Amino acid sequence: MSTVSVIPVDALRPRGAATEAAQAATRWPLERVEALYELPFLDLLYQAQQVHRAHFDANQVQLSTLLSIKTGGCAEDCGYCSQSAHHDTGLAAGKLMALDEVVEAARAAREQGATRFCMGAAWRSLKDRDLERVAAMIGAVKDLGMESCVTLGMLSAEQAQALKDAGLDYYNHNLDTSPEYYGSIVSTRTYQDRLDTLAHVRDAGIHVCCGGIVGMGESRRQRAGLVAQLANLDPYPESVPINNLVAVEGTPLEHARPIDPFEFVRTVAVARITMPKAMVRLSAGRQQMDDALQALCFAAGANSIFYGDTLLTTGNPQVQRDRELFERLGLRACG
Ligand code: SAM
Ligand code: DTB
Ligand code: SF4
């Protein structure tokens, strides 16, 4: 069993692993993460750059393309999400896409330069009856020579193993915010549900892609709480998406006050420092950022983006705009 070292809430401790020694060994106590956030901006960026350059070519950025293979009508009530059946966002619910359409989209993404293809479904959890079709999609993406990633909601241990057997490289399952703030954003599942799925993914030998969203009205301490949770996963995720809330009309977070852009950059930097070898992905919200802010995020240690004109249901910068940005910054796409 993989272990999950979790910070302060007793109820969230992994079953059977809540020894004092384990807590003492916590790599990133909340206070330490908060202290990073408190650094002068330029000192924080300098530290993040040093960590980044110790582990990566700082001018290389990995490109993943997303596809929503099953859109809308989701049973969960996540306050940020356009796809929840609990919110009236005007998004029509669709069915699981056909294999040939998925293959066509993956091939187009590969031609544009993406090395990983991520398929997302608006499900609370994967149903066994859909497993075979999703497995076929994963196999087809692998046959194109791309890395595969899916995000399908909660998984059992057996389902995680079946996805691994189908050739899955990454499973995306975000913790989204700190344990203390989670109940203000989602009521239909618990933080522990998320941790359980992450443990199943890890135990099946699939790479973990796990991050969160900022700009949902959380405090800095709660942002630090999210990063601490991620950094104390044992091991920490290979891929850490940092999403800036896309405030979707009709969701409870429609009028959330946008986060200070420098606070967003700080979050990227703190993620880089606390998870040195992870791919830190500058994720949702890029369309709302100007080039200078994105450049700061790369300077803070972001080294991966979602590439392609749409995310799942919302917009992303046009491929041409990203190409121009990479050109201006001397960034290179990498596998
Ligand atoms: N249903 C699955 C789940 O929740 O794990 C997979 C799809 S869900 C859309 C994947 C992730 O997208 C969420 O965990 C959240 O972090 C991110 N996301 C969804 N809506 C967003 C929004 N409006 N702004 C920023 N990130 C968002
Ligand atoms: C992640 O952390 N961000 C991506 C991916 N994982 C699946 C999704 C962002 C979704 C943004 C809102 C939308 O397009 O629906
Ligand atoms: Fe459903 Fe995922 Fe959206 Fe939550 S984030 S409502 S689980 S699609």
Image (cartoon, rainbow, N blue to C red):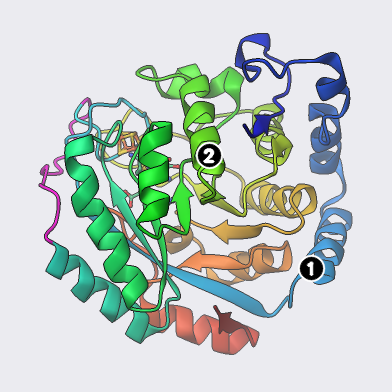
Which residue is drawn at the image coordinates 19% and 29% (left, top)?
A: 85
Label 2 or label 1, whichever comes before in sequence order: 1
**Residue 327: x, y in percent?**
56, 89
Q: Give the residue pinned by disc 2.
A: 215
The residue range painted magenta reads: 86-98
Horizontal side, residue 185 vs residue 313: left or right: right
**Residue 211 forms part of the magenta stretch:** no
- When asked about the image quadrant of residue 55, the answer is bottom right
Which residue is drawn at the image coordinates 72% and 40% (left, top)?
A: 231
Looking at the rendered image, the quarter that the C terminus falls into is bottom right
For this rendering, which residue is in front, 97 or 324? 97
| Magenta: main secondary structure | loop
Which element carries disc 2, helix, strand or loop? Answer: loop
Looking at the rendered image, the quarter that the N terminus falls into is top right
Q: Amino acid at mark 1?
A: His
Q: Residue furthest top?
A: 11
**Residue 68: x, y in percent?**
25, 55
Which residue is drawn at the image coordinates 37% and 64% (left, top)?
A: 316
**Residue 87 forms part of the magenta stretch:** yes
Q: Amino acid at mark 2?
A: Gly
Which residue is drawn at the image coordinates 78% and 47% (left, top)?
A: 274
Q: Give the residue pinned by disc 1.
A: 55
Which of discs 2 and 1 lies nearer the camera? The answer is: 1
Ligand 3 is located in which of the four quadrants? top left
Which element carries disc 1, helix, strand or loop? Answer: helix
